[in-house]
Image: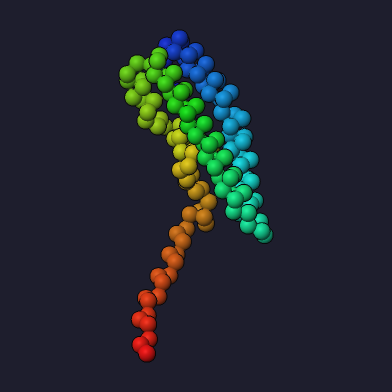
């Protein structure tokens, strides 16, 4: 939280955050369920391509709803923060997670497992095309 907020700004910020969480909590739960459903479908013995695509579209819609809720929250904040506070709001503060780390983001999270962070060897290049044999 920004340290230079007036008591009135702190109250409005708390209200905006509470409202945001009330809207996004069920969306984030749905997002988790959809991700689990997609993962199960991807690993199923029988591929259900239309089902996977349908779940992926639902996932995208929920991610869009979360992004809109975040934009509406940020718009509320701009209504009572001064220009300098708004500017700082747009720059990740130390100890704060950037939006990419929140559920619903499409940006990948940083890996914390050292073994998982090892580079993966690139796939071998395809063999050059051979000219067709002449008859």
Q: Quadrant of residue 80?
A: top left
The answer to whether residue 43 is visible is no
User: Looking at the picture, how far across and down is residue 24, in whole percent?
Assistant: 56, 28
Q: Which residue is outermost to the top? A: 8
User: Looking at the picture, how far across and down is residue 86, in whole percent?
Assistant: 36, 22
Q: Is residue 82 left or right of residue 40?
A: left
**Foreground of the two, 101 or 26:** 26
Residue at x-position 63% and y-position 40%? 33
Residue at x-position 52% and y-position 55%? 116
Residue at x-position 54% and y-position 20%? 19
**Foreground of the two, 130 or 26:** 130
User: Looking at the picture, how far across and down is residue 103, in whole percent?
Assistant: 53, 37
Relative to residue 121, is residue 88 depicted above or below? above
Residue at x-position 59% and y-position 44%? 55
Relative to residue 4, is residue 90 depicted above or below? below
Q: Is residue 25 left or right of residue 105?
A: right
The answer to whether residue 26 is visible is yes
Which quadrant of the figure contains the C terminus? bottom left
User: Looking at the picture, how far across and down is residue 108, in whole percent?
Assistant: 47, 45
Which quadrant of the figure contains the N terminus? top left
Relative to residue 6, is residue 96 depicted above or below? below
Q: Is residue 11 left or right of residue 28?
A: left
């Amino acid at each position: 939280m920004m340290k230079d907020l007036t008591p009135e700004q702190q109250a409005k910020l708390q209200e905006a955050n509470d409202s945001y969480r009330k809207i996004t909590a069920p969306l984030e739960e749905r997002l988790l369920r959809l991700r689990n459903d997609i993962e199960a479908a991807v690993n199923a013995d029988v591929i259900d391509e239309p089902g996977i695509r349908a779940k992926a579209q639902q996932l995208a819609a929920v991610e869009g709803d979360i992004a809109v809720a975040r934009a509406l929250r940020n718009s509320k904040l701009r209504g009572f923060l001064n220009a300098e506070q708004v500017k700082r709001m747009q720059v990740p503060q130390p100890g704060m997670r950037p939006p990419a780390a929140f559920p619903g983001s499409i940006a990948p999270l940083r890996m914390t497992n050292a073994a998982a962070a090892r580079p993966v060897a690139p796939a071998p290049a395809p063999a050059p095309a051979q000219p067709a044999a002449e008859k």
